[in-house]
Image: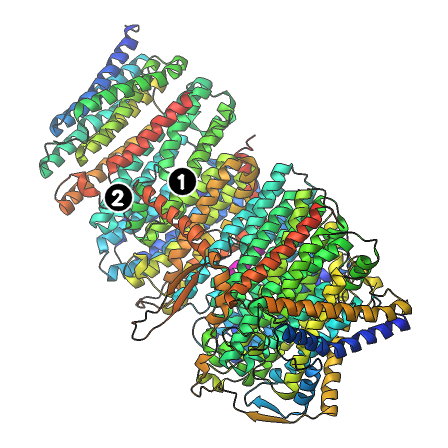
């Protein structure tokens, strides 16, 4: 069983990467949230698995945190938000999807090439998946750049956090507990604030289109 | 300073005072002859001065004290100038007090005061004359200075007596730079002494006059002093020129005999110089005021080129 | 029973308390009181450090050393003066109807929580907690910036949140990499994110990972420092929030970010051995100085202009630390201190000026010294100080930085020259007519609180003319702690 | 104030510090008595003047004593304020004290109630300015130097804009401060080079460093740039003709008379004292700069129609001459010709001293005239010699000195300068030898032109008939103003008549900087000023003056004795045209017109010529500084252009901002990957 674990972790890693790509490609916000939820689930699975194998209770805890936050609470809240503000579509992206995909592949290659020397050094089970984590981070970064509505941007931001957590879990078998808690707390508060914000933005600009948020320029104003 | 020195100094002063009007008279005389006019006589300037001194002075009611003492100051400046230029002998106790540069400074001082006096009354003519005078001056002064530097580069000194001594009693040598300097000096002295082609001493034509315009308001003793100062200036320039370019015959220190000999030589040289000046004036035509800067600029450049030639030939 | 408890406890408590009563009229004074308490506690702690050197608190989760204790005191001090300044200021804002009681409550409690997060970030020994504190600081300040609820303030806050959130995320990845590197050396026991332990073994950390990590950390925390080109959020956030918030943002938050970068720089230098970290920092510093200078020259909004000047000064500090060496580090620390003091003082005066004029557009603020000479001279002297006119302290540090750079990195001096020159020209060009000439302004109901301004200026003057020996002791130790780079 | 040489003993440094502190205290008192004008005017300023005299006395005795050190417990921790009083500083302290004494006395009568800065604040700024001047020359490490230097700039800036309601005055002050600060940055970098990476900023250490020619040249060029900016050397002169007219007259007097010299002090300190190596082209560079500046300045000053602008340009000219002198001294020094270097340096220093006095005097007189007539445009003045004789006659002295006429200070300086140029023959390089005649010619030309300018200045203001009605009730200067001006007049005269004594004071300076001096040659010839040997050249202003005066008196008496002194006053001759009026006199423009024609290519002129058909024909000509268009505006435009480009970065779209961070991250990752 043990000898399958690395493959399993790598499999989960690949799934996460796949999901990031899927998110880049996806236009419907509801689906986007669902994809995000699945990504969180995969993350949870990975951390539980590693926790079981390296029998570190910390990983269970962090997995649980992720479960509660990323799989249950945040998706629920996002769903609620979009229902309230009824924004279902993020029709126009700033760049068209295929281009974004191509750039994304380039990023993956870069990430792997960066992670390769580091991964060799790591003696944890899933050290090799550092590259994937980095790739996820960069991809979600790019997603944030390309999306023109507030909600997808936030989702991109959160999936970037997923990537980070995965990196922490896979590469270093989890950060110290206190840090985990702090991070979780920050994410929670952050999401709450974002939710509030979206309502306020909506009420000021009666749309979540961030093209409205381009008044503060530097044209001598 | 030896007794002889003091004596020769006084002699030089006296000579300048007395001979200056004579020189002016002589130049006018020659010019009239060459222009086939009947000449008023060589002594005419003395008579004019005498007459002027006798008259009551008439002065603008709002003329300031500066206007009144300017003639005295100008006169004494010229006096001092002719005192430090070696005319008869190079043994002048006063000459260490002022060298070539100081001589130029002295002329400049006189010029500034005469111009200020001209501006004082505030008639249109006076200021016009002052402006033109300064225009002439700001090019003539450096030109004159450069001429003197030419000499002092050769002789390695700026003290006039030293220059003349070396030029006169060093074994004879030809300095091409001095040729240029000589031409420059002639042009400068024409301009400085209000001579044709720069100015015409005996017309009152507002288009052209410079010196006359400045002293237009003066009368009687003040005018006399101004005129006398003018002729002193002419005398001083001529003596300086002679001393620089034809220094032979000027007596050295403590040689009374040479001193006796120097006087006739000087008179001769002056006579010839005056005649030449008159001839030049007759031959040339008055130029427009705006061409004066070009004229003097040429002089200035020549003098500088003279200096450069000195350096080039490694003289001094 | 440690004094640190009070240093952290006062603001935390204040945050909670003001969350309940922040909308009352006396809340302003409560705010001041808590800040004052924090400051006193910080002073006591300082005294301890001066007497018996660095010490750990609570199972070495917290570590107080000369470097952070003086930053703590500085933060507490500026926090206090700013709260004093905000009393009349916020009163006027309320009169103008820009603030409502619930917003006042939010403002006050967030103000305290914000200073708590900063102090936490300074004092903690755990690099992970540093990250947490930074993120928390971001969140609190986001709320502070958006407190007016105007479209522009919302926009500014949104940008601030997204950009800094992303940046911070990079920083977290960097931290994870550091953790990974440490993990290999120290094994799996949980103390591996404690800075003290790390710096003990920094020589053995793997250089590849560390350099990779430093890139992420620099980009991440650099976003919060406001280094060009990650600076874009800064002018918006500073210009749109309430002036006291601009003051603490410029004066303090940037310092926290800088501080954390420094902590990591020490580790990276130790691990990599080459100057790579320093060179990166110098590059970013120069870029920030020059670009910010040119931005500055085209601003019309006074607060935007001075926030760009903050970017420029942060660039200068980054450059100084990048150069390394005892003198440059000393200069950097000095510059951090003086910049906090002077810049916050400037924002105080600017706040009053803008309230008098009813606008932040500089061309409509004229002749301050006619209406209120003290504000006018305050702004004038502040501007003089910030552009590096002696005898103010900014000059002292710029003197050291420039002279050191001239011989160690001559290639950099033309850029510094250009940057400083353009900054000087632009700031004075705008400030002179604001201060002098005929006026367009009207006096206000509430007298301005100018004691903070002149206290800050006086301190800046002292730092320029004669640095007190104990303070100097701090600087020297701290500079040494950052390691004299080769 | 603990002093190193004799602990406890009360030495020169302490006295100077006493004066500095006293000035600061006076300034503070001014703040205390912010609006009590009479107290400030009649107590504080005169007391300040007294301390100036004290400073002068101290400096005189300090000039001949050995250098003294002092360390103040101020400044950076590792770097307390080091002060040093050597012969160089002493000379400049003498200059500061001498001029400021007169100017302060004048200021006591000058400052009036009214617009702009309250008198007390003015008093503070003024005395802080004085104190910083004194500190700059005392400084013995880079930090205190820069602190004093910038304090000087800042205080003078506030003085300049003291009447800040006028926008043009504000912009003048702005330009001034900007140029000064850019210069200061250059100076800072210069010190950065000089400290040679030792981290020790004391001048003593800098003297000890031996820089490679490359670095030394960089330091020199930076220094010349920085200090030149403050001194108004081409092409960084543009602030000067703006700031001087903007400032109140006593302030312009101090700035032009003293502050510019302090800038030159910086050049001296750096290039002769701190730098150990001297390279010949430095001298040539400085000489070329100086001559260009001088010619530019004098040509512009002749065509000015505004009193103070005219004087400001003439200051530029004099600064240029001094720089030329320094350059020559450097040239000689680099070839080890110490005596000649000493001669050139002495000439330059002499010029500094006399310029300080006569320019201070002239600026004060403009102040008095402006108070009497509230008119600064030459075209509207005239005939004032009859209404304000005190001002007129003292101005005459100043003008003659400025025109470089014997027997005043200006002439001695120019005389020495020309002498030193004459000696340049015999330099090892023939190319340099060729340079000499040209430079000498230029200097002569410049001197003559300044004569032209001064005749215009004095003649148009004080002579002729009043061009405006109101001038006829102009009042003469008050008591304090007269006192100050008389003091400065005395300075000019003394400098003119007793060159040997002055040179004796300058000698220690030259001994220190170029290890050569003229004291010995001067000492043995009591009345004659003899630079090298009596055969070479000599000048005795006193005898000179005696000669002129004696013949003056003699002629006067003789004329009276032999003839008479009768005088009739009548209206001037109207040339047969009875409708003449005062407006028909030559205007200032008219007086400058020939120069404007001759040097046309110097100027950027815009003429407005009348047409034959004009109902009311008018002629106007505007003369501007071409450098402003060739240098300053392009720089400003470049900055605007770049900042416009940079501004594009900040265009509001959050996606773009994210992209910046993203790209930065990627790039840096690639960088460290290598």
Q: Percent from the top left, x then y, of residue B285?
A: 55, 67
Q: Secondary structure at mark 1?
A: helix
Disc 2: host chain: C
Q: CB of mark 1 within 8 Å of CB of mark 2?
A: no
Q: Percent from the top left, x then y, of residue D568?
A: 59, 94
> In this picture, is B295 found above or below B123?
above
Q: Please provide the residue range marked out in magenta.
A: D147-155
> In this picture, is D260 found above or below D275?
below
Locate the N terminus of chain B by quadrant. bottom right
The residue where tag 2 is placed is C157
Q: Tell me the tag on residue A16.
A: none
Q: Secondary structure at mark 2?
A: helix
Does label 1 or label 2 sit earlier along the sequence? 2
Q: Give the overall secondary structure of the magenta segment.
A: helix
- Disc 1 to disc 2, C-alpha distance: 22 Å
The residue where tag 1 is placed is C288
Q: Percent from the top left, x then y, of residue D3?
A: 72, 56
């Amino acid at each position: 069983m043990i000898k399958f674990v690395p493959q399993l972790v790598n499999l989960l890693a690949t799934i996460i990467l796949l999901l990031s790509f899927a998110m880049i490609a996806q236009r419907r916000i509801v689906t986007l949230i669902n994809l995000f939820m699945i990504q969180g689930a995969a993350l949870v699975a990975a951390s539980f698995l590693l926790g079981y194998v390296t029998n570190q209770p910390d990983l269970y805890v962090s997995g649980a945190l992720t479960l509660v936050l990323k799989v249950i609470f945040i998706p629920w809240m996002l769903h609620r938000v979009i229902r309230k503000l009824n924004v279902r579509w993020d029709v126009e992206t700033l760049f068209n999807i295929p281009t974004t995909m191509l750039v994304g592949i380039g990023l993956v290659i870069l990430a792997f090439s960066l992670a390769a020397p580091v991964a060799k050094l790591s003696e944890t089970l899933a050290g090799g998946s550092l590259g994937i984590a980095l790739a996820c981070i960069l991809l979600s970064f790019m997603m944030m750049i390309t999306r023109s509505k507030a909600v997808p941007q936030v989702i991109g931001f959160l999936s970037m956090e997923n990537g980070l957590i995965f990196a922490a879990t896979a590469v270093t078998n989890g950060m110290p507990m206190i840090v985990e808690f702090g991070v979780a707390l920050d994410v929670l508060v952050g999401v709450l604030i974002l939710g509030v914000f979206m309502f306020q933005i909506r009420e000021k600009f009666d749309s979540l289109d961030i093209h409205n948020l381009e008044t503060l320029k530097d044209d001598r104003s | 300073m030896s007794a002889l020195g003091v004596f020769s100094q006084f002699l030089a002063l006296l000579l300048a005072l007395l001979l200056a009007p004579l020189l002016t008279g002589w130049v006018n005389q020659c010019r009239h002859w060459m222009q086939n006019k009947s000449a008023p006589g060589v002594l005419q300037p003395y008579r004019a001065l005498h007459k002027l001194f006798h008259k009551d002075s008439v002065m603008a009611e709002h003329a300031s004290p500066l206007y009144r003492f300017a003639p005295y100051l100008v006169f004494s400046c010229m006096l001092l100038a002719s005192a430090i230029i070696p005319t008869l002998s190079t043994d002048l106790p006063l000459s260490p007090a002022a060298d070539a540069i100081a001589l130029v400074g002295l002329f400049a001082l006189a010029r500034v005061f005469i111009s200020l006096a001209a501006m004082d009354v505030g008639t249109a003519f006076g200021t016009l004359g002052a402006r033109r005078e300064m225009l002439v001056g700001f090019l003539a002064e450096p030109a004159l200075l450069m001429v003197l530097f030419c000499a002092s580069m050769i002789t390695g000194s700026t003290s006039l007596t030293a220059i003349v001594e070396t030029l006169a009693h060093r074994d004879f040598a030809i300095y091409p730079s001095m040729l240029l300097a000589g031409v420059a000096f002639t042009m400068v002295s024409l301009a400085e002494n209000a001579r044709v082609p720069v100015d015409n001493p005996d017309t009152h034509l507002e288009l052209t006059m410079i010196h006359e315009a400045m002293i237009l308001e003066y009368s009687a003793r003040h005018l006399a002093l101004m005129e006398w100062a003018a002729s002193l200036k002419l005398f001083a320039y001529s003596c300086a020129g002679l001393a620089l370019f034809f220094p032979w015959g000027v007596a050295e220190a403590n040689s009374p005999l040479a001193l006796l000999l120097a006087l006739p030589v000087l008179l001769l040289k002056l006579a010839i110089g005056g005649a030449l000046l008159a001839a030049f004036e007759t031959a040339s035509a008055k130029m427009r005021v705006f061409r004066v800067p070009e004229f003097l600029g040429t002089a200035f450049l020549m003098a500088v080129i003279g200096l450069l030639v000195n350096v080039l030939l490694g003289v001094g | 029973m440690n004094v640190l408890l009070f240093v952290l406890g006062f603001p935390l408590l204040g945050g909670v308390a003001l969350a309940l009563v922040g909308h009352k009229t006396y809340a302003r004074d409560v705010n001041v009181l808590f800040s004052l308490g924090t400051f006193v506690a910080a002073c006591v702690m300082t005294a301890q450090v001066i007497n018996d050197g660095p010490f750990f608190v609570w199972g070495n989760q917290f570590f107080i050393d000369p470097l952070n204790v003086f930053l703590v005191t500085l933060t507490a001090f500026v926090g206090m003066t700013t709260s004093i300044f905000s009393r009349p200021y916020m009163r006027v804002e309320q009169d103008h109807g820009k603030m409502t009681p619930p917003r006042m409550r939010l403002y006050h409690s967030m103000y305290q929580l914000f200073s708590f997060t900063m102090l936490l970030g300074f004092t903690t020994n755990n690099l992970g907690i540093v990250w947490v504190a930074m993120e928390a600081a971001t969140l609190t300040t986001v709320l502070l910036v958006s407190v007016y609820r105007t479209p522009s303030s919302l926009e500014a806050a949104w940008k601030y949140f997204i950009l800094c959130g992303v940046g911070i995320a990079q920083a977290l990845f960097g931290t994870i990499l550091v953790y990974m590197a440490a993990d290999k050396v120290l094994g799996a026991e949980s103390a591996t994110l404690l800075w003290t332990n790390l710096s003990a073994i920094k020589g053995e950390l793997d250089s590849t990972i560390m350099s990779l990590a430093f890139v992420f950390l620099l980009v991440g925390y650099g976003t919060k420092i406001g280094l060009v080109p990650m600076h874009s959020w800064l002018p918006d956030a500073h210009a749109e929030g309430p002036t006291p918030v601009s003051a603490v943002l410029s004066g303090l938050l940037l310092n926290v970010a800088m501080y954390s970068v420094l902590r990591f720089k020490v580790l990276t230098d130790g691990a990599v051995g080459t100057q790579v970290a320093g060179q990166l920092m110098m590059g970013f510093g120069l870029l920030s100085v020059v670009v910010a200078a040119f931005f500055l020259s085209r601003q019309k909004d006074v607060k935007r202009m001075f926030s760009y000047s903050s970017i420029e000064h942060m660039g200068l500090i980054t450059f100084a630390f990048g150069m390394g060496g005892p003198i440059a580090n000393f200069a950097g620390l000095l510059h951090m201190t003086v910049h906090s003091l002077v810049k916050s003082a400037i924002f105080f005066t600017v706040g009053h000026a803008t309230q008098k004029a009813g606008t932040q557009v500089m061309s409509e603020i004229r002749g301050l010294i006619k209406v209120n000479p003290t504000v006018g001279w305050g702004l004038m002297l502040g501007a003089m100080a910030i552009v590096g006119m002696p005898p103010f302290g900014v000059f002292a540090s710029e003197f050291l930085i420039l002279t050191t750079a001239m011989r160690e990195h001559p290639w950099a001096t033309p850029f510094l020259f250009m940057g400083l020159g353009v900054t000087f020209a632009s700031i004075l060009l705008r400030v002179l007519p604001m201060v002098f000439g005929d006026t367009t302004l009207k006096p206000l109901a509430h007298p301005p609180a100018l004691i903070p301004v002149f206290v800050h200026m006086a301190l800046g003057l002292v730092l320029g003319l004669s640095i007190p020996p104990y303070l100097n002791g701090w600087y020297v130790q701290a500079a040494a702690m950052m390691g004299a780079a080769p | 104030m603990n002093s190193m040489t004799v602990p406890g003993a009360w030495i020169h440094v302490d006295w100077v510090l006493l004066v500095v502190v006293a000035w600061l205290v006076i300034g503070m008192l001014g703040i205390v008595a912010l609006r009590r004008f009479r107290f400030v005017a009649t107590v504080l300023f005169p007391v300040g003047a007294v301390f100036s005299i004290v400073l002068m006395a101290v400096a005189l005795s300090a000039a001949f004593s050995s250098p003294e050190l002092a360390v103040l417990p101020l400044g950076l921790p590792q770097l307390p304020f080091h002060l040093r009083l050597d012969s160089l500083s002493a000379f400049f302290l003498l200059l500061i004290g001498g001029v400021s004494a007169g100017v302060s006395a004048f200021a006591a009568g000058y400052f009036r109630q009214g617009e702009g800065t309250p008198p007390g604040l003015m008093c503070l700024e003024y005395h802080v300015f004085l104190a910083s001047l004194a500190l700059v020359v005392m400084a013995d490490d880079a930090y205190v130097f820069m602190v004093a230097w910038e304090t000087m700039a800042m205080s003078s800036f506030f003085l300049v804009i003291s009447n800040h309601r006028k926008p043009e005055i504000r912009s003048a002050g702005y330009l001034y401060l900007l140029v000064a600060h850019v210069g200061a940055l250059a100076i800072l970098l210069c010190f950065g080079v000089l400290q040679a990476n030792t981290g020790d900023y004391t001048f003593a250490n800098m003297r000890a460093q031996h820089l490679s020619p490359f670095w030394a040249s960089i330091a020199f060029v930076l220094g010349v740039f920085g200090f030149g900016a403050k001194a108004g050397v081409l092409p960084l002169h543009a602030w000067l003709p703006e700031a001087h007219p903007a400032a109140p007259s006593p302030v312009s007097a101090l700035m032009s008379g003293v502050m510019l010299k302090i800038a030159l002090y910086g050049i001296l300190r750096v290039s002769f004292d701190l730098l150990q190596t001297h390279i010949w082209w430095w001298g040539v560079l400085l000489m070329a700069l100086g001559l260009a500046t001088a010619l530019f300045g004098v040509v512009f000053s002749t065509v000015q129609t505004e009193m103070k602008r005219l004087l400001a340009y003439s200051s530029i000219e004099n600064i240029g001459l001094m720089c030329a002198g320094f350059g020559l001294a450097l040239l000689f020094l680099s070839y080890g010709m110490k005596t000649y270097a000493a001669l050139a340096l002495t000439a330059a220093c002499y010029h500094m001293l006399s310029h300080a006095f006569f320019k201070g005097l002239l600026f004060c007189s403009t102040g008095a005239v402006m108070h009497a007539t509230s008119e600064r445009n030459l075209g509207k003045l005239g005939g004032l010699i009859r209404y304000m004789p005190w001002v007129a006659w003292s101005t005459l002295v100043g003008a003659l000195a400025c025109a470089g006429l014997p027997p005043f200070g200006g002439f001695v300086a120019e005389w020495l300068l020309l002498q030193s140029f004459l000696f340049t023959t015999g330099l090892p390089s023939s190319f340099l030898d060729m340079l000499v005649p040209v430079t000498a010619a230029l200097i002569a030309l410049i001197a003559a032109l300044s004569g032209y300018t001064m005749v215009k200045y004095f003649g148009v203001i004080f002579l002729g008939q009043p061009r405006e009605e109101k001038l006829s009730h102009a009042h003469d200067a008050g008591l304090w103003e007269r006192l100050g001006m008389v003091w400065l007049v005395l300075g000019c005269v003394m400098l003119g008549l007793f060159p040997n004594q002055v040179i004796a004071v300058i000698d220690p300076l030259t001994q220190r900087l170029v290890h050569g001096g003229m004291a010995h040659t001067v000492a043995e010839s009591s009345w004659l000023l003899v630079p090298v040997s009596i055969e070479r050249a000599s000048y005795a202003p006193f005898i000179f003056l005696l000669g002129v005066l004696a013949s003056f008196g003699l002629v006067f008496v003789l004329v009276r004795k032999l003839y008479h002194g009768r005088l009739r006053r009548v209206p001037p001759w109207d040339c047969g045209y009875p409708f003449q009026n005062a407006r028909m006199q030559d205007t200032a423009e008219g007086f400058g017109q020939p120069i404007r024609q001759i040097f046309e290519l110097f100027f950027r002129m815009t003429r407005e010529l009348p047409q034959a058909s004009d109902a009311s024909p008018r002629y106007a000509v505007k003369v501007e500084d071409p450098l402003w268009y060739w240098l300053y505006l392009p720089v400003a435009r470049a900055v605007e252009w770049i900042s416009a480009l940079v501004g594009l970065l900040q265009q509001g779209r959050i996606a773009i901002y994210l992209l910046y961070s993203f790209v930065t991250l990627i790039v840096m990752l690639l960088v460290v990957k290598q």
